[in-house]
Image (tube, helix red, strand yellow):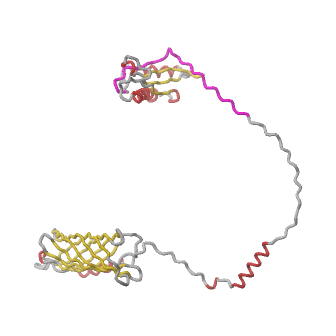
Amino acid sequence: MRKILFSVLSMVLFTTTTFSYDSSTRFYPFLGYTRFHEATDLQNSIMLGVGLNKPITESFRADLSCAYLPSEYKSSGQSAAVFYSSLSGEFLLPELCCGTKPFLTAGLSIFAFNGKIDNGIELGIGLLSLSKKKIEHKFTVKARHNPADKKSDIIAIFSLGLMPLNGKKENTVLAPDKKDEIPKELRMIIEEEKKQKAIVTTPTVTIIEKPIKTEPVKKESKPKPKKAPKIIFDNDKKIVIDRFFYNSAFIGNPGNNYIQKAAKTLKENPNLKVSIVGYANSHEKNPDEISLQRAINVQNDLIKKYNISNNKIKTKSGGHTKATNNNYLNRRVELDFYSEK
């Protein structure tokens, strides 16, 4: 069973090397070998895994890799599924020759098997090589140390391939087919014929233009501005809603009765409109805002509760400009009814 699993995973790893990815993050499969220390009671085993390699700068990369190890226990000989994960950084050194670069690697790793976790610190060296197809190959040897049991492992990893270094494919320009090329002599003859066709003799014609009669331009008369409608207030129908609480725009009783009376007045007199002005006293917080909110609350009740058209209502803030000595009366809303003629 282990041989079949190893064969299938190997085929998958070799197949993925034929693909390239247009991304700065490089995906790569790898094949490796691990020598376990005695404390783990595991036999030495091969590694099958995949990794992600992200270039951070020109000389530093971040590497994340995960692998599966089909190993056995030394004591019992039973099979053990071992999983390996590593997070490390790779510091690239100056190029040696033929596109080969050495690098140093350092990071943390974990072995997980049978409910156990073996932590470790990894330090290693490696080589990066660039093939003709611009695909990287990487070989790394790491020394892994476990601070808990003070034992070390040796890990050797060979990646089968990385994505091409050039993230974008170069545009190739096809050379023209020799059969489609036109000889020089024939090209010159064609150009001369084009020039002759372009030269066309046309008879000269004298055109006598008749004078055009110009009519005087009439000045456009500007439209007369419309006169503003005359506003007539009906002081007999004026309503004042007072008894607002300090720093509050809540309408209580008898304010609701006054709003009902205002709605009845507007419905019985279709030509009438209403101007709603809210007031406050100078001791209230933000008197301009609270006075406007009192007027808006009255307007909302007329529209929502009594279906009065919004076109018949105007609201504004009176602030505390008309404040009197009686602060109780200053916290009010005045409704003035008027008609336009």
Question: Does residue 172 appear to the left or right of 327 in the view shown?
Answer: right
- Percent across and percent down for residue 118 are 17, 70
Residue 237 painted magenta: yes
Whether residue 318 sits left or right of residue 127 in the image: it is right
Instruction: Answer with the quarter of the image where residue 13 lies.
Output: bottom left
Horizontal and vertical percent for residue 198?
A: 78, 72
Q: Quadrant of residue 339?
A: top right
Q: Is 228 covered by the magenta stretch?
A: yes
Q: Is residue 143 above or below residue 276?
A: below
Question: How far across and down, in percent of the image, does residue 165 sit?
Answer: 40, 75
Q: Does residue 185 appear in this view?
A: yes
Q: Residue at x 50, y 23 (%)?
A: 274
Residue found at the far top of this picture: 236
Q: Residue furthest front?
A: 94
Q: Position of residue 75 (x, y in %)?
A: 10, 79
Q: Is residue 46 left or right of residue 319?
A: left
- Picture quarter with the N terminus: bottom left
Secondary structure, magenta segment, majority class: loop
Q: Quadrant of residue 56?
A: bottom left
Which residues lie in the magenta part? 221-248
Q: Is residue 8 visible?
A: no
Farthest left residue?
Answer: 75
Q: How many numbered marks, from 0 up?
A: 0
The quadrant of the rendering that contains the C terminus is: top right
